[in-house]
Amino acid sequence: MALDVATLFICELYVLLFLIIITAFAWSGAQYNKVLGFNCLSLIVSVLAVWLSSLRTEGLLFWSVAMGNICVLLAYGLLLSAFRAFRGARCGYDWTVGIIVWGTLCLFPWFWNSMHNRILVSCLMCIIYTAAMIRELHHARAMLPVTFWPARLLLWIHLLFSVVRAVLDGGVPSPLYGAIGGSTFSVYVILESILIVIGMSFTMMAMVNERTQIQYKQASLLDPLTGVWNRRALFEKADRLANPASAPRIISVMLFDLDHFKSINDRYGHSHGDTVLIDFCRKVCAELPADSFFARLGGEEFAAILLCDEKVTMEIAERIRQMTDASRPQQVHYSVSIGVASSADALSRVDMLLAEADEALYQAKADGRNRIKIYRPDEKRLPTLPAAG
């Protein structure tokens, strides 16, 4: 059965109008997300472009060829802006170049009077805009562990279709009524545009939803005051390291307790206490190796998981203790007691090391604070590194 171009044209209008309604609701439900806003505007302009293209049968070539294709390029530019907004980049104005080029070319007879030339330029513009979207999507791949590949596949399909059209569409005028592209290739253009606009609209909504879910999960694992990981995140990390298949051969744990922190709050106020907590976290994060994991357990208690041996861990702990003792945020002096536990056993459980480090920390505080205690299971009294003095 032959496909009727006029029927497909009407179907495309209904599909676009339906997607505009869906995207508008999604935009408002997502707190007026810029990505969905740009996508919605792109769909609205696409409806205008489709309607203008239908005026070709009325002989209104200026509106169908010049303005219709300008609207198509504007829709591409808005969709490109949506991808840029997704990764937090500036939308810029370079996407308007295609509109300016098309409008300028329409002034030349060799372009205006040749459907084949117009189709070639149109395909080239589509390829350039789509390639730019693929580039923007690639920059945002870290935010999209799931929807990155479907979105990339859709864009590549659209780009390759434009290449195929540039090769196969000879610009032969279609004798059928309502041919949106004006050539015998119109039916394929409409079918592909319907499928790609549906796929991209729902993929864009899925991308925004996935990023939002990741942001919420990240927020639930971060301490809101200091910006470091929280207790829940620490134990999630500990569970992953407890897997024998993925556990490293050497694991060390440090537990920190800021000395006499309650007296700092009582003497200077909670705002100064918060400053001390933030200052301590900055100093610890600056000293820990990149593959370490540092978290606030609550109040003035912190923990770090390191993939280092005992000797390296003790060196890091001592640097942290010295930097803390020398720090004076808002003229407030504070110090830290540290408990350390380490194991070279590949099957060591992090929760056991945390318990051992907690025992060492208790002894460090009992021995006068501002010092480091190493857990030794075979010794009644744990060796201590006293404060320099």
Image: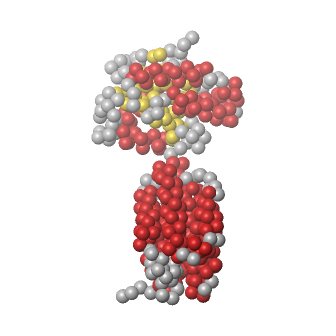
Q: In the displayed orientation, state which residue is furthest to the front.
A: 110
Residue sitting nearer the eye, 307 or 339 = 307
In the rendered image, the vertical position of residue 255 relative to residue 315, given as above or below:
below
In the rendered image, the vertical position of residue 372 relative to residue 8, given as above or below:
above
In the rendered image, the vertical position of residue 91 relative to residue 7, given as above or below:
above
Q: Quadrant of the C terminus?
A: top right
What residue is at 51 percent from the left and 41 percent from the top?
Answer: 230
Report the coloring of the rendering: secondary structure
Residue sitting nearer the eye, 180 or 241 = 180
- Residue 277 picture quarter: top right
Q: Position of residue 137 (x, y in %)?
A: 49, 55
- Residue 76 picture quarter: bottom right
Q: Position of residue 54 (x, y in %)?
A: 57, 83
What residue is at 42 percent from the left and 41 percent from the top?
Answer: 237
What residue is at 58 percent from the left and 24 percent from the top?
Answer: 324
What residue is at 58 percent from the left and 67 percent from the top?
Answer: 73
Residue 230 seen in this snapshot = yes
Q: Quadrant of the N terminus?
A: bottom left
Instruction: Please tell me how many numbered marks the rendered image carries.
Output: 0
In the rendered image, the vertical position of residue 12 relative to residue 256, given as above or below:
below
Residue 18 seen in this snapshot = no
Residue sitting nearer the eye, 115 or 382 = 115
Q: Position of residue 197 (x, y in %)?
A: 50, 71
Residue sitting nearer the eye, 25 or 39 = 39
